Image (cartoon, grey):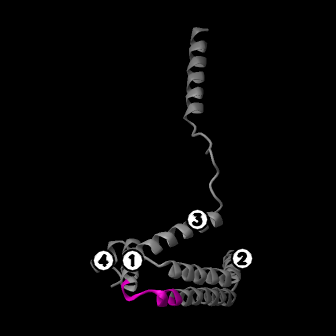
């Protein structure tokens, strides 16, 4: 009897310990991805505008440029997402190489159109900048690129 009570007490202690060890539920649910990207985009723009010391007029023009690019790319982004899903589904379904090639070409075409929209927006934005701001923007881009590429790019490693 004493042995049974000891086992019961031990199991109860272990169970209560596991119950308390569970992490509490998050107090506020995470933001949906679209809202999170929107918030990040706004913060990134503000930091960039501050670092480049944009005038109020430049800031307003830049916001307009980027907003127009987002608006014009939104339908393409949806098509691109659907095309990527179709490509993945074709691979899972064992479709022929010709089908996969056709779907891949569609994905590539849409990605190219998205790149063109972003690049044209960047060209308009870059044209707004003074020579000093362009130099600063180039340095910021180089810094960001080196952070994402790791030390390979900075040290002349792989890919060079």
Mark 4: give few (<14), some (14-19) or many (20+) Cα within 10 Å: few
- Residue at horizontal 53 percent and vertical 90 percent from the top: 124
CA gap, disc 2 and disc 4: 43 Å
In the structure shown, which secondary structural element does the residue marked by tag 2 occupy?
Answer: helix
Mark 3: give few (<14), some (14-19) or many (20+) Cα within 10 Å: few
- Say left or right for 15 vs 54: right
- Say left or right for 149 vs 15: left
Q: Kindly identify which numbered label has been placed on residue 154.
A: 4
**In the rendered image, which residue does mark 1 sit on?**
140
Residue 94 appears in view = no
**In the rendered image, which residue does mark 3 sit on?**
39
Taking depth in this image into account, of 26 and 58 the one nearest to the observer is 58
Residue 19 appears in view = yes
**In the rendered image, which residue does mark 2 sit on?**
93
CA gap, disc 4 and disc 1: 15 Å
Pointer 4 or 3: first along the chain: 3
Give the main secondary structure, helix, strand or loop, of the magenta stretch.
Answer: helix
- Say left or right for 63 vs 132: right
Highlighted magenta segment, given as a residue range: 123-132
Pointer 2 or 1: first along the chain: 2
Taking depth in this image into account, of 1 and 115 the one nearest to the observer is 115
Exactly how many numbered labels are in the figure? 4
Question: Quick check: marks 2 and 1 in contact, CB under 8 Å?
Answer: no
- Residue at horizontal 69 percent and vertical 86 percent from the top: 96
Mark 2: give few (<14), some (14-19) or many (20+) Cα within 10 Å: few
Above-or-below relation of 37 to 75? above
Residue 94: x percent and y percent?
69, 79
Q: Quadrant of the N terminus?
A: top right
- Residue 6 occupies which quadrant of the picture? top right
Question: Quick check: marks 1 and 3 in contact, CB under 8 Å?
Answer: no
Pointer 1 or 3: first along the chain: 3
């Amino acid at each position: 009897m004493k042995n049974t009570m000891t086992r019961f007490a031990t199991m109860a202690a272990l169970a209560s310990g596991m119950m308390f060890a569970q992490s509490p539920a998050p107090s506020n649910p995470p933001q949906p991805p679209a809202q999170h990207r929107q918030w990040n985009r706004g913060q990134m723009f503000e930091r960039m505008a501050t670092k480049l010391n944009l005038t109020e007029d430049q800031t307003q023009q830049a916001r307009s440029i980027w907003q127009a690019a987002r608006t014009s790319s939104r339908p393409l982004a949806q098509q691109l997402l659907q095309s990527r899903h179709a490509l993945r589904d074709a691979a899972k379904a064992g479709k022929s190489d010709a089908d996969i090639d056709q779907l891949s070409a569609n994905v590539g075409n849409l990605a190219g159109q998205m790149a063109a929209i972003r690049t044209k927006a960047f060209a308009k934005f870059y044209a707004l900048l003074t020579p000093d701001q362009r130099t600063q923007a180039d340095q910021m881009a180089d810094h960001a690129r080196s952070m994402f590429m790791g030390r390979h790019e900075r040290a002349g490693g792989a890919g060079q």
